[in-house]
Image (cartoon, helix red, strand yellow):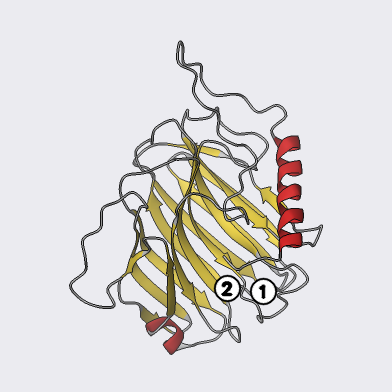
Amino acid sequence: MYRIPRRAARLASALVIALAAIAFADTPGSLAQDPVAVPQPDATIAPGEVRDPDQQSRIYFKIPVANEMVRLQTHFTVPPKPPRVGTMFLWPGLEPRPGGRNYDPIGLGVLQPVLTWGQSCAPPSQPPAYSTWWIAAMYVNVGNDPNYSGCRSGRAMSVKVGETLDIDMVLNRTTGVWKQTVTGKSGSVDFSINMRNQAQNMALFAIEPWNNARIPGPLDFSDTTITFRDRADDSCLRPELTYQGPGGRISTPTVDGTRCHIDSISVTSPTQRVEPLAEAGAH
């Protein structure tokens, strides 16, 4: 996540909190745990927002700002239920890079279908805390544009442990509308937003824990395809990769015209013990 000026950061956080306060006015509480009370997750938390979560783990796949990503397709599996504490966000996403087409006035935001354990800033109707994993297609922005800042999403869908989730994020290049669709055995949810032709130049794959939430193992994405606006073999075969926290690893990409395919992407859990790698560049 890029560094945000303090004033903008404070404003973004305030907007997220205000939106969340409205959104969760009638959200059900967690299941009763008698005689031990279960701590409630912070409903103002937004995945990818400017405040610092606990140690998180991300893989960034970046392309030059002269090009852009117009579609992201991937798959991942709902993990076992974690302990009933904090909030856990698991997600792939797309972000703009400063200097890319129409970066301003919308600024920094992330298109992200987010699998959540606990509560989040959106949507307004969510399952009771810690009753189930749930997923919603979301957009979270930490900029100052009132039409985009804060949390936005489609509806939430409860999902089952072991369920495979198919993710499709695609740009309608005629209208400028991004549509995110999540499909699994539990059904399908989607969310559309017009990004006013702001270019998305970076794909992210993330484990984002808050308030001591943890999962024990890696988060694995499979059969991932990133479609570029313009053919750029080097951007696929020799991508600019950066990591946050423990990071992870990706398999060697292959290219087919404007489509960049990655068989496997594995994000290391912040609590996972990682053995040193024998070969440089495998991380």
Disc 2: which residue:
70
Residue 101 in percent (x, y) is at: 69, 80
The residue nearer to you, when weighing 234 against 213, is 213
Residue 225 in percent (x, y) is at: 43, 70
Q: Which mark is residue 173?
A: 1
Q: In the picture provided, is 59 more to the left or to the right than 53?
A: left
Residue at 82% across / 57% down in the picture?
Answer: 146
Residue at 46% across / 73% down in the picture?
Answer: 61
9 is higher (above) or lower (below) than 89? below
Q: Earlier in the sequence, mark 2 or mark 1?
A: 2
Residue 42 in percent (x, y) is at: 59, 36
Q: Amino acid at mark 2?
A: Val
Residue at 50% across / 68% down in the picture?
Answer: 203
SS for dot 2: strand
Q: In the picture provided, is 209 more to the left or to the right than 4?
A: left
Q: Residue furthest right?
A: 146
